[in-house]
Amino acid sequence: MSQLDRKKDWWIEFHDDHLVDSLLESRDDLEIKKTLDFIVTRLGISKGDSVYDQCCGVGSLSYPLAERGMKVIGVDRVSTYIEKANKRKLNDNVSFFEGDASNYKIDQKFDGAFNWWTCIGYEKREADLGMLKNVFVSLKSNSKFLLDTMNLVGVIKNFKKEVSIPYKSNDSEAILKRTTEFDYKTGRMIKKWQYSFTNKEDVIKHSSVRAYMPWELIELFKESGFNEIQLFGDLDGSELTEMSPRCIVEGKKCL
Ligand SMILES: C[S@@+](CC[C@H](N)C(=O)[O-])C[C@H]1O[C@@H](n2cnc3c(N)ncnc32)[C@H](O)[C@@H]1O
């Protein structure tokens, strides 16, 4: 077990503004559009329907979805992200709440739900199972849930120990250098995140996320009560292969 895994609450320090600037808010309009087109189509939702954005971050997907006329509730356990999301609140169709999605109770049933961009694996499998069971309970009968995470088979096949991602921080150039290692004993991906700026000192953060094989995700879905489980490899609905950029799992509450 690495030192980071022993530090149970590593995610509090990790989820800062640098992650928001370099990744969460770096998606352009086209990527957001493609993501939402996929989510709306697969969930079979339309204007006026209620949607649960589980692990919503700063609301990067909740907002544009609410603009399309859906009623969105977003939950995330990082208080500063929920504060940011609420500050942007220009739309009455969206609300945000701080909470741990593995046990957060929402007194409402939704027409659809999603959990986007690798929000599972932060803790133990039981917590991930809790997250899926919780979302299952929050859905109306015959509604669907989508989970988007890394495609582990592809990550291994095309393994890159180091990647550099240029981005803008307060309108000036910055670079995120990310170094990845596998912990073979725990199945976790341990990453070092080094943010470099032109005008200030580097910032270094760490993360430790359990990576699941697709069949392990299917097991989690089944154990949570989902049926009609399907796998996709990309936002065009293509089949999951070792070349796919993502692993997207869909499940239906058939009660
Ligand atoms: C990579 S971000 C993705 C955010 C958002 N889904 C998006 O697409 O912009 C992962 C998010 O998952 C949240 N998260 C992870 N585990 C969580 C949990 N148990 N409860 C609530 N939020 C969680 C983190 O706080 C973080 O905001």
Image (cartoon, grey):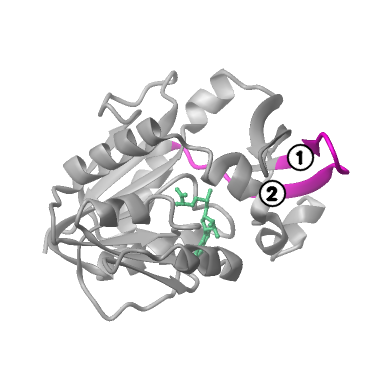
- Residue 197 sits inside the magenta stretch: yes
- Residue 102 sits inside the magenta stretch: no
Q: Residues within 10 Å of mark 1 (few under 14, many from 20)?
A: many
Residue nearest the observer in this picture, 89 or 11: 89
Residue with the mark numbered 2 = 207
Residue nearest the observer in this picture, 121 or 40: 40
Residue with the mark numbered 1 = 195
Which residue is drawn at the image coordinates 74% and 48% (left, top)?
Answer: 206
Q: Residue 24 location, x and y as percent? A: 53, 46
Which residue is drawn at the image coordinates 59% and 49% (left, top)?
Answer: 20
Describe the element under mark 2 as helix, strand or loop: strand
Query: Residue 36 sits in which quadrant?
Result: top left
Q: Which residues are magenta?
A: 191-213
- How far apart marks 1 and 2 lie (CA) works out to 14 Å
Question: Is there CB contact under 8 Å for labels 1 and 2?
Answer: no
Q: Which mark is residue 117?
A: none
